[in-house]
Image (cartoon, helix red, strand yellow):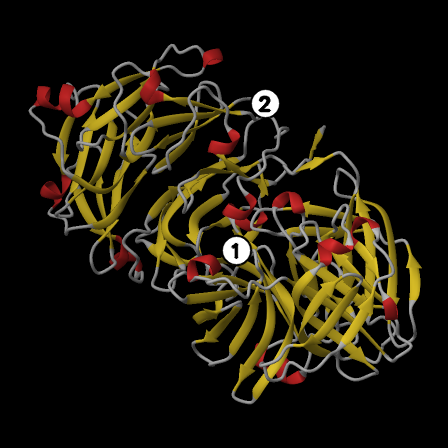
């Protein structure tokens, strides 16, 4: 039996999971409290990922002690490998550390079902005075000593007296009932540790009690162990984490490339100086071309933020070496034999080497597979639905429900139907049908057009319109959608020959069966009747419908001229017109955006080669004209592919785009203004906040909420938004904060 989680995670209802948490590592880094240097917590989770039982032990200079039960805890699983944890109903990062509120939080998943071997949870106040950190594994259900056998690479954080903790790196070998810990040779500054641990007998569920107060825990796939020394009679205590190094393999850059969530500790002051802080938690992007970037997770675990480091990397055997391009600091990691876990070995700068402690866990679609499906999504209409095609060609919907919860829906995984999508997506458009008030998405591939529908119960289904509609041809590029004054939905674009084609909903369609469509090739059947020819469009198209039901599909040709394919009730059919010929407009680049006014004005905006925004505009009773909005507003140059537009309920006209710093710039006009004005919507954001990149897309809700969407980093979807109830523009990373739908 499988029991659904409210956030889409499915758990086997077999027996409670048993997980080890090592907490309090680093408590006392800069304080005199040495009683709780190491904390070990064993606990079980129920099917809702809540504590069912827990016990806790500590080791410090005050001796070992049992603390009994632990506080109730709720785990929430998010995409991008993030783990949300709440204590006593208070979600992180609103927790308190030993000396006050935790300013920074980082987390990583450790659940076997999601494909993770080891995870972490860490936090620190702004001054890094009392760093708290832990590792977490899902324990092996029925491990024996034989599962622990073999060679391991381990890293240890050791507390000796009241001195600073020492990070050690070594090799471990296990055979029979003995584990031998030895120094790692050949790496300067790794320290020396030698210890033999004898295990009395096999223990169940992956826990092995050894001599000298040492306890070893083995994870679910026997790829990671955690070791704890709880015997303080000799004046020291330690924790260790180990992986199996793949020393004989020919590791390639392609094997290493990927995204990792990282948590590292600098045991010494010198190490902290090299890293910048005692506890660091970067989002590490390792590229197959030999470069890497790091973004800070510690300040806000939900957003990757600005790049804080970048450089080059290389791999030799089972060791990867990252070299910072600015500082020259080198960080070395051991690569596990499955390629999914990295253990830090050393950080080195001009002053010499220093050892590190921590772990990096790969976050990869290839590792975790398709996102899990929540079989019980919220019913009813959505507040907002935003579509995009991911960097691997997956059509996704970001849903905002009435409770304020964002969900990421992978349409291919989520939707059911007789003819499912198998090709990668090229374009997506999303709309709400005014007849049934349901959310729809059209997705084009190289050979097919799919229609996705979210019903009143929140269930997504899919149809292949190319296969279902008689005589249909695939829209292979430049997908657009519009709704006529008669409430007829039209999906339009270009076929493989560059012809303009449309899928038109039948006006008297039966809602219970979903919208029914007809197909028409406008270039072949309609334009010749008016003596028109199809423009040779380049770049993206856009579409709009006027108050008098004039339907328009507009775009640019190779010369930068604005072309419209249009019809109205009085036009006598579909026609084409070169608007740039009528206005004498300078050539435009990139994409176009259209906004309409309450007095019937049409404004088609784009960017010229200098980054200035030009508007090709018309009002009833006049001819087409052009205006340089950037000159009027005094706006900086904008990126040519970034422009978007929106109109507010109070009549504000807005054209937005990105400047050279990826700040969102808005050119805006209000009734009563004598000219256009300019505002930087992201100027008040913190430097570490994400910034959108590439093409922007804007929308306005009936409530007045303004939204500007874009992509940040490798593939994160971000939202810059303004609400009437709170001054200022804000930003959020939807890829990080959304639950998997």
Q: Would you say residue 485 is visible in this rendering?
A: no
| Marks 2 and 1, how far apart at CA | 35 Å
Q: Position of residue 420 (x, y in %)?
A: 43, 25
Question: Image check: 314 left or right of 144?
Answer: left
The residue shown at (53%, 22%) is 455
The location of residue 278, given as percent across then percent down, is 66, 75
Q: Residue furthest front?
A: 176
Q: Taking 427 as reference, is 504 above or below it?
A: above
Q: Position of residue 378 (x, y in %)?
A: 62, 30
Tag 1 or tag 2, which sits nearer the N-term? 2
Q: Nearer the viewer, residue 544 or 642?
A: 642
The relative height of residue 429 versus residue 204 in the rendered view (above or below) is: above
Most foreground residue, 367 or 513:
367
Residue 236: x and y in percent read 83, 78
Q: Local crowd at mark 2 within 10 Å, few (<14), some, or many (≥20)? A: few
Relative to 560, residue 257 above or below: below
Q: Give the camera-side residue of 137 and 437.
A: 137
Q: Are marks 2 and 1 in contact (CB under 8 Å)?
A: no
570 relative to 106 in the view: left or right: left
Q: Is residue 362 above or below residue 306?
A: above
The image's mark for residue 457 is 2
Q: Residue at x 38, y 26 (%)?
A: 450
Farthest bottom residue?
A: 351
Q: Residue at x 70, y 82 (%)?
A: 192
Mark 1, other Cα within 10 Å: few <14 / some 14–19 / many ≥20: some
Residue 353 visible to an observer of this rendering: yes
Q: Secondary structure at mark 2?
A: loop
Q: Which residue is mark 1?
A: 728
């Amino acid at each position: 039996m499988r029991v659904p989680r409210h956030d889409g995670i499915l758990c086997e209802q077999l027996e409670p999971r048993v997980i080890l948490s090592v907490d309090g590592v680093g408590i006392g880094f800069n304080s005199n409290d040495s009683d709780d240097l190491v904390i070990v917590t064993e606990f079980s989770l129920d099917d809702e990922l809540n504590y069912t039982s827990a016990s806790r032990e500590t080791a410090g200079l005050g001796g070992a002690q049992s603390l009994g039960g632990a506080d109730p805890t709720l785990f929430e699983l998010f995409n991008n490998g993030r783990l949300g944890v709440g204590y006593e109903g208070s979600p992180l990062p609103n927790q308190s550390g030993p000396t006050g509120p935790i300013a920074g939080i980082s987390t990583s998943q450790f659940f076997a079902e999601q494909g993770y071997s080891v995870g972490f949870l860490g936090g620190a106040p702004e001054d890094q005075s009392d760093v708290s950190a832990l590792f977490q594994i899902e324990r092996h259900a029925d491990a024996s000593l034989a599962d622990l056998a073999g060679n391991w690479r381990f890293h240890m954080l050791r507390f000796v007296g009241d001195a600073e903790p020492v990070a050690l790196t070594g090799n471990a070998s296990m055979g029979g009932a003995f584990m031998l810990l030895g120094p790692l040779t050949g790496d300067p500054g790794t320290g020396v540790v030698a210890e033999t641990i004898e295990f009395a007998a096999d223990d169940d569920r992956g826990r092995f009690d050894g001599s000298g107060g040492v306890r070893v825990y083995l994870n679910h796939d026997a790829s990671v162990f955690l070791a704890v020394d709880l015997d303080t009679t000799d004046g020291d205590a330690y924790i260790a984490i180990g992986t199996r190094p793949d020393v004989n393999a020919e590791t390639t850059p392609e094997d290493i490339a990927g995204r990792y969530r990282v948590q590292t500790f600098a045991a010494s002051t010198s190490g902290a100086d090299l890293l910048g802080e005692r506890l660091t938690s970067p989002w590490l992007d390792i590229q197959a071309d030999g470069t890497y970037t790091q973004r800070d997770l510690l300040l806000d675990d939900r957003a990757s933020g600005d790049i804080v480091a970048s450089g080059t990397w290389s791999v030799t055997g089972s060791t990867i070496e990252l070299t910072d391009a600015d500082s020259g600091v080198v960080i070395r990691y051991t690569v596990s034999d499955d390629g999914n876990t990295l253990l830090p070995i050393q950080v080195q700068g001009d002053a010499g080497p220093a050892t590190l402690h921590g772990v990096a866990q790969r976050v990869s679609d290839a590792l975790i597979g398709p996102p899990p499906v929540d079989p019980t999504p919220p019913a009813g209409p959505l507040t907002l639905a935003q579509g995009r095609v991911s960097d691997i060609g997956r059509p996704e919907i970001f849903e905002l429900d009435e409770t304020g919860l964002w969900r990421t829906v992978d349409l291919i995984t989520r939707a059911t139907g007789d003819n499912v999508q198998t090709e990668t997506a090229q374009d997506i458009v999303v709309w709400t049908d005014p007849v049934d008030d349901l959310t729809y998405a059209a997705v084009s591939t190289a050979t097919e057009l799919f229609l996705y529908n979210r019903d009143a119960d929140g269930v997504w289904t899919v149809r292949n319109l190319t296969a279902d509609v008689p005589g249909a041809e695939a829209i292979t590029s430049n997908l657009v959608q519009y709704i006529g004054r008669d409430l007829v939905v039209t999906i339009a674009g270009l076929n493989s020959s560059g012809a303009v084609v449309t899928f038109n909903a039948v006006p008297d369609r039966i809602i219970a069966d979903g919208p029914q469509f007809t197909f028409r090739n406008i270039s072949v059947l309609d334009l010749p009747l008016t003596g028109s020819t199809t423009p040779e469009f380049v770049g993206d198209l856009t579409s709009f419908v006027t108050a008098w039901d004039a339907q328009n599909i507009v775009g640019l040709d190779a010369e930068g001229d604005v072309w419209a394919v249009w019809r109205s009730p009085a036009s006598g059919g579909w026609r084409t017109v070169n608007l740039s010929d009528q206005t004498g407009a300078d050539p435009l680049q990139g994409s176009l955006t259209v906004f309409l006014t309450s007095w019937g004005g049409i404004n088609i905006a784009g960017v010229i080669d200098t980054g200035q925004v030009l508007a090709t505009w018309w009002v009833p009773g006049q001819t087409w004209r052009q205006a340089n909005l950037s000159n009027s507003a005094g706006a900086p140059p904008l990126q040519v592919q970034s422009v978007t537009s929106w109109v507010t309920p109070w009549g504000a006209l807005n054209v937005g785009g990105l400047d050279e710093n990826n700040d969102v710039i808005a050119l805006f006009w209000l009734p009563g203004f004598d000219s256009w004005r300019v505002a930087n919507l992201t100027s008040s954001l913190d430097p570490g906040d994400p910034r959108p990149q590439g093409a922007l897309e804007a929308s306005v809700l009936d409530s007045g909420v303004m939204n500007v969407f874009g992509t940040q980093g490798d593939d994160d979807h971000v939202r810059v938004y303004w609400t009437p109830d709170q001054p200022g523009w804000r930003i959020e990373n939807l890829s990080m904060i959304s639950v998997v739908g």
